[in-house]
Image (cartoon, helix red, strand yellow):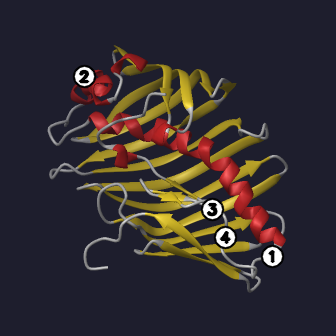
Amino acid sequence: MRRWIRRSAHAVWRGHACVLLLGVSAAGCGLKSPGLSLEAREVADDATEAEPTLAVGATLAAFPAAALSPSTLTLADAVAAQQGLPDLMVDATCLTVSTDGNVVTYELDGCSGPWGQAEVSGREVATWSALGSGVFEVSFQSDGLEVEGRAAEHAGIAEIVVHEGGGRTISWSGGYEGTSALGRAVSHEADLVVSLPGGGVVELDGTASTTIGLRGLEVEYDGLARPGPRGTCPSGVVRVTTKITRLTLTLTFDGSSEVFVESSRGGHGTLDLECTPAEGE
């Protein structure tokens, strides 16, 4: 399978009750504690099942920003820069970019999603607008999108700010609908701010609402950050709450390779991450 964007891979993220991946992966999804209830473990399982679709949706919203540089100041610059996206792929043949005025169409043919996780085909149509020098609004709408051969839909609006030092900030509000690997319907609505100051650093704040099957989850990202290149251990907090019973799992990342997981009903456990602590941690 082809991988997603080779450089600027830090422009996407994933996080939930069993795995948080800012270019970091979990060493399995088993929470190491008998102290968590069955319901708490089910919350983790639901979030894990829903995560691949969330990762694809987030990537589709963020990857056009990878082509922008500090010299991308005008709308014409931003649209023209999108033609360079295939060159940022491991295999440029899976992505074709065409432009018509301020409308950019990304044609995906068997590209794989973040970290080789899910194969994606179909079209993503983006309408670009300038909000100021180096500030752009991008309206996304999928067309015939398929993830692992299953129909999906993706739509939303991103505000992208290009900073003088080369960093970017992406404010994303939108939704995604698809099907999990186990065949359950999955939908997401997200309101997130991703800061990419450079050097592989990713900072994430905001909320997401997920429905998988008949159950729903609310996710809050609070000061979540990866302080270095892909594979560096993150810090910050993620809270996952069930919409009906209001059970909350709080995941605390402290820059080490272990995550502390605490239930609002008193249970707790830990989760191992495959990551390297930043220098000084």
Number of other residues with Cα within 10 Å of mark 1, as a class: few under 14, some 14 to 19, many 20 or more:
some
Q: Could you tell me how far apart the alpha carbons at marks 3 and 4 are, in whole angstroms?
A: 8 Å
Badge 4 element? loop
Q: Position of residue 201 (x, y in %)?
A: 30, 59
Identity of the residue furthest to the bottom in this view: 266
Q: Could you tell me how far apart the alpha carbons at marks 2 and 4 are, in whole angstroms?
A: 47 Å
| Among numbered discs 2 and 3, the one appearing first in the sequence | 3
| Among numbered discs 3 and 1, the one appearing first in the sequence | 3
* Vertical order, 57 against 50 (above or below): above
Residue bearing the label numbered 2: 80
Residue bearing the label numbered 4: 31
The residue shown at (40%, 20%) is 103
Badge 3 element? loop
Q: Amino acid at mark 2?
A: Ala
| Among numbered discs 2 and 4, the one appearing first in the sequence | 4
Residue bearing the label numbered 1: 37
The residue shown at (32%, 66%) is 227
The residue shown at (32%, 37%) is 6
| Among numbered discs 1 and 4, the one appearing first in the sequence | 4
Q: Position of residue 105 (x, y in %)?
A: 43, 19
Contact (Cβ within 8 Å) of mark 3 with mark 4 = yes
Badge 2 element? helix
Q: Amino acid at mark 3?
A: Cys
Q: Could you tell me how far apart the alpha carbons at marks 3 and 1 are, in whole angstroms?
A: 15 Å
Of tags 2 and 4, which is closer to the observer? 4
Which of 86 and 118 lies nearest the eye of the viewer?
118
Residue bearing the label numbered 3: 18
